[in-house]
Image (cartoon, rainbow, N blue to C red):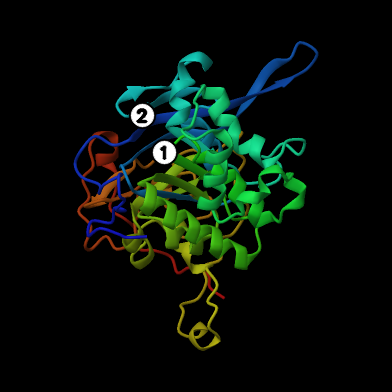
Amino acid sequence: MKKTADGAAGGTSGGTATAEEPLLKVTGLVKHFPIHKGLLRRQSGAVKAVDGIDFDVRRGETLGIVGESGCGKSTMGRLITRLLEPTGGTVEFEGKDITHLGVGAMRPLRRDVQMIFQDPYGSLNPRHTVGTIVGAPFKLQGVSPEGGLKKEVQRLLSLVGLNPEHYNRYPHEFSGGQRQRIGIARALALNPKLVVADEPVSALDVSIQAQVVNLLDDLQEELGLTYVIIAHDLSVIRHVSDRIAVMYLGKIVELTDRDSLYANPMHPYTKALLSAVPVPDPRRRGVKSGRILLKGDVPSPISPPSGCRFHTRCWKATEICGTQEPPLLALKPGHQVACHHPEDTETATVTVTGPAAAAPAPAPAAEAEAE
């Protein structure tokens, strides 16, 4: 995938990222799933899957979302595609607020916002042929492709690397990688502007993962697509993303371009994640610094810790971390971090307003436990 100097992806029709209005803008997005108990089904609590996140996606770029299982990244993907109704916050697409649009009002926007699901088999109806599955968006939107539906579906199958003659086959006759290509063809049927890919390669073999990732890159360059790719594999995210957002327990803790994140992570959680990436070359394993071992389990999203949600596992935590939630601030140009004691503070310019301005100076970091 061709990258521009400022980290944006270039496409034939998507263009490069500029100071223009972002394609997607998310502000204070919240999703709480209520918990009901008893015969009267009274609400006794809520799972705070997404608890106030802010980001935007520029035209033609790829934003990667990474984090541990259960951090809320898949829920976030369904919120921005409006497959789930947000509890709070706003989602704007091309400057239009789509947060609470009904089914009828969202139908025209489905052409522009599509999703690729994690399970390449569960997302396909086993009773329908490939032709019916890929052709469904045209029928639902009332679109008649030039040259006929069958010809257009076969063109899409060829575009994603499948044999057009497989038009009448069923999903069970394909491998996992081929099924995912069918899902990609369906998502691209109506020429969307934004594609949200939820763990698009996690269910595939390693060799097939590379093929699908390269296919997504090629399609972005050819069609000018904008991606939001959700994954827990840091190697995949590094390959496909222009900017990366790191999530922890429903919050974004760091957001910056790919090179800055991997070269100089500023949040302790990001640093711990990167330390866990395996080194495939045995000759380089000795060069890599020791892995940071986080103590304890991820807290429950039903009752997240007060203050910084990571402070119960953080080796740099001080008293303020347990009482005051750090805001997501730009500590460097284009590098946002939510931490009271970020890494590399010597070169960071911290701009704090409001209650956070009273925070004490960062305490010396305790040495992380390493293997």
Q: Amino acid at mark 2?
A: Phe
Q: Quadrant of residue 194?
A: top left
Residue lying farthest to the bottom in this orientation: 283
Say which residue label 2 marks.
93
CA separation, marks 1 and 2?
A: 9 Å
Left or right of residue 211: residue 98: left
Residue with the most extreme right position: 39
In the picture, measured across the screen, residue 82 lies left or right of residue 176, that is: left
The amino acid beneath tag 1 is Leu
Point 54% across, 52% down: residue: 158
Pick whichever, 68 or 75, lies toward us: 75
**What is the quadrant of the N terminus in the image?**
bottom left
- Is residue 287 shown above or below 344? below
Circle on res. 194? 1
Q: Position of residue 88 (x, y in %)?
A: 45, 23
Kindly identify the residue that appears in the image at 38 percent across and 47 percent down: 223
Relative to 252, say whether 302 is above or below.
above
Viewer-closest of 246 and 222: 222
Q: Place residue 320 in its image quadrant.
A: top left
Image quarter of the C terminus: bottom right
As helix, strand or loop, the secondary structure at mark 1 comes to strand
N-terminal-most mark, 1 or 2: 2
Kindly check if marks 1 and 2 are in contact, taking CB atoms under 8 A apart as contact.
yes
Residue 166 got which mark? none
Q: Position of residue 148 (x, y in %)?
A: 53, 33
Q: Residue at x 61, y 68 (%)?
A: 207
